[in-house]
Amino acid sequence: MTIVVTGASGHLGNNLVRALLARGEAVRAVIHKDDRALAGLEVERVQLDICDAAAVRRAVGGAKLVYHLAAKISIVGSMGGLVHRVNVEGTRSVAQASLAEGVRMVHVSSIHAMQQMPKDQPLDETRARVPLGDRRWPAYDQSKAEGERVVRRLLDEGLDAVILHPTGVIGRHDYGPSRMGTVFIDLWHRRLPALVEGGFDFVDVRDVTSALLAAADQARGRRGESYQQTGHWRSIADIAHAAAAITGKAPPGLSTPTWLAHVGAPFMTLWSQLTGKEPLYTAESLLALDSNRDMRGDKARADLGHNPPPFEHSVYDALAWHRAAGNIDPAAPLQVPAGLTVDANGGA
């Protein structure tokens, strides 16, 4: 039987599809428009609007399992309601279809669904979720918390679902590229004039993929449970220096204080509106960089076998993939971090 993956062409989605195919599974890849990340993969492609309940129901029909990864990530607000529409109403469509078809749903939420305060206490799955309609919280955070609540309400009606909360995902097969993938590329090309203070918890895409596979097993991913996939908290400066140790490219010598970055954030947003390009940072992304530094993944370690590698190994793997993809010089030598063995393709 088929496994459905929504958001299959995204960074995490296409890594999951590859892992499922390696297991010999038949995959129905639900996409919106761009399917570059699935090129050459033997999957059934279904293009649809994730909020089209009837189309989603047809896509889920006959499946044995549904992975819901489709989401709209934003650091620029609600995007005219698009963030809520995709992350809440889209999740509702998938959850209702999964319930109607009687299949397990593995829902990918986000660490951003959790309230970050108090920051001096560990953040785990018991933390209160971000409230809907509270402007102190970014639209994306609100939408991911509300999407989880949608799933939980349907649990009461019999939905079999488990919920995962990854932190910042980095790693291979980053076709977008993601925001962090863009940071690695820009560091290589020395496009960043300065670093910004703050940091975040980053987890390897391969480890989130492994947790997703484990969560599908009812004996491991317990129905109705949330699991955080954490990695390592690193400052932006730490990331730049880790990349520099691998590429030999010196990081920017300047560091912008958070207060100064907040002053410049409105101008970044205005520049984005005028050019149509995503801003380097916004008030929302700066808020994320001031998040809780003690995010816990103990439950995922115990139940799902989550075991992230050293951060430097993940950075190397990301850079090696971007080199192979031509996003950085394909002939560039990369210094392998201590303790890491690379495969025949140069990946970690």
Image (cartoon, grey):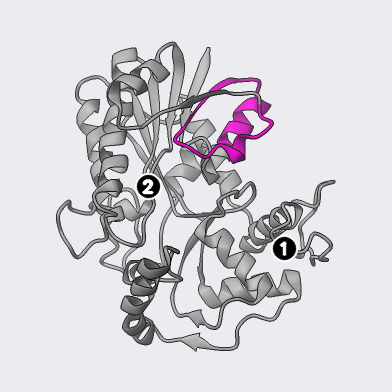
Numbered label attached to residue 179: none
Kind of element beneath mark 1: loop
Asked if residue 20 is among those painted magenta in the image, a careful observer would answer yes
Segment tinted magenta in the rendering: 16-41
- Confirm or deny contact between disc 2 and disc 1 (CB under 8 A): no
Residue 230 image offset from top left, x and y in percent: 47, 53
Relative to 244, is 179 on the left or the right? left
Relative to 163, is 84 on the left or the right? left
Q: Is residue 198 above or below residue 4?
A: below
Nearer-N-terminus badge (2/1) = 2
Residue occupied by mark 2:
72
Q: Which amino acid does label 2 sit on?
A: Lys
Q: In which quarter of the image is residue 114?
A: bottom left
Question: Between residues 151 and 60, which one lies in front from this camera angle?
Answer: 60
Q: Residue 42: tell me if it is visible.
A: yes
Tell me the residue at 29%/54% (across/down).
79
Q: In which quarter of the image is residue 103?
A: top left
Residue 39 image offset from top left, x and y in percent: 65, 34
